[in-house]
Image (spheres, rainbow, N blue to C red):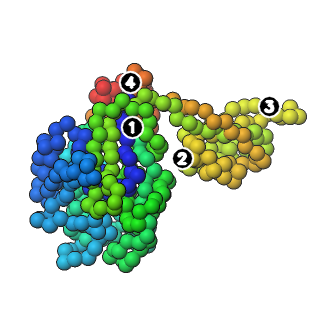
Amino acid sequence: MRAIYLDCSMGVAGDMLAAALLELHPERQRFVDDFNSALGGLVKLRAERQSKQGIMGLHVTMDIGGEVEGEEHEHHEHHHHRHIGIGEIYGIIDVLPLPEKTRADAKEVYAMIAGAESAVHGQSMEQIHFHELGTMDALGDVVCVCMLMNELAPERVFASPVTVGSGTVKCAHGVLLVPAPATERLLRGVPYQAGEIKGELCTPTGAALIKYYVNQFCPMPIMRTEGCGYGFGTKDFGRLNAVRAVLGEVERQGEAVVELRCNIDDMTGEELGFCMERLLEAGALDVWTQAIGMKKSRPAVMLCCLCREEQRETMLRCIFENTSTLGVREETMNRYALVRQSETLETRLGAVQVKRAEGFGVRRSKIEYDDLAGIARREGISLREARARALEETT
């Protein structure tokens, strides 16, 4: 399985991640030319090979009309430039001559950033406005990373826990604790630590990109490496200030999961169904029931919930809140799964979502049932015929 491992022990910023991934690209200059052409002069990527503490790596900057924003751009410092909103940012991304997936990824990442700012400041996303120079710099980082991920095409992205730094950081809203509020919001659900260094090591842009792309935070898995890239930050901390990206092949490994079970003999089907819905909404990998017999010859139901280890407390709380059970059993096991992705394809019968899975020498695809059912109803045909027609255009 082709994978990338990101070492974020010195934090992560958008430019550092872009530089580390660019180091892995086999056609670096071609990529830089393609990026600058796609951005049409709005942002110009400059990539410079440097040596820091005896290690060769890459440092990238985004030139916006002859100006280069420093690290403080992540917090939207107010200069003489105007401010722009999320709608205008989406408009810029929409017209970039990029693959549709790259544009969609960039918009999703920026939606995460705007959503965090919105929550922190108590305003709607439409009310959030970003300093233009800093935003274009960050937009360049986001688009660059999305393009690189699309071209490097890892099946999985792993990363270490993120070191965020400590102390305070000065931004447009004053002196704030590290991690800055928007960064903290974005890192919820991501394992991170303060570390020993005073200063800001993780920026909102870096946090959003890491959260969007990383499939699993863990120690580096066993890899047969193909390449390694160092993306340097601007500041010097006495330690190598870099994100390290390693590209290679990872043996497919089982994922540790927890199965939670409880026996229930005094709930209605509607109540059980509601609990199952709540568990799935909370992120359970799967939820099911099976018929059992209990004491006093009572017919009953065993409710089963499959989740990741870090979701255990959330699922337990949900089960106890929504069922009558007084106890839950657990079993930890390994789960092996194909790598899955979905895409929406336009056909003459309408848009259909196609789910694809790959791994262990197997490839398969399946059209979403709801889309097939919609086609069958509209066309007055059977589900089987709808599937056959749709497959003709999607395979």
Q: Alpha carbon of mark 1 to alpha carbon of mark 4: how far?
A: 16 Å
Q: At numbered mark 1, what does the secondary structure look like: helix, strand or loop?
A: strand
Q: Which residue is drawn at 43% across and 47% down?
A: 160
Instruction: Give the amino acid type for the residue marked by disc 3 in the picture.
Output: Gly
Q: In this view, does 209 lie to the left or right of 277?
A: left
For marks 2 and 1 on the same chain, the one whose residue lies earlier in the sequence: 1
- Among numbered discs 3 and 2, the one appearing first in the sequence: 2
Q: Which of marks 3 and 1 is nearer the N terminus?
A: 1
- Numbered disc in front, either 3 or 2: 2
Q: Residue 283 carries which label?
A: 2
Q: How crowded is mark 3: few (under 14 residues within 10 Å), some or many (20 or more)?
A: some
Which kind of residue does numbered mark 1 sit on?
Arg
Q: Residue 363 carries which label?
A: 4
Location of mark 3 (residue):
293
Taking the spot 51% from the left edge, 31% from the top edge, the residue there is 254
| Residue in the foreground of this view, choosing between 32 and 246 | 246
From the image, tell me which residue sits under label 1: 156
Q: Do the residues labelled 3 and 2 touch (CB within 8 Å)?
A: no
Q: Which of marks 3 and 1 is in front?
A: 1
Q: How far apart are marks 3 and 1 (CA)?
A: 43 Å
Numbered disc in front, either 2 or 1: 1
Q: Which residue is drawn at 26% across and 76% down?
A: 78
In this view, 146 is above or below 298: below
Front-most of residues 210 and 212: 210
| Image-quadrant location for residue 374 | top left
Pointer 2 or 4: first along the chain: 2
Question: Is there CB contact under 8 Å for labels 4 and 3?
Answer: no
Give whichever of 388, 48 is nearer the camera: 48
Whether residue 206 appears in this view of the structure is no
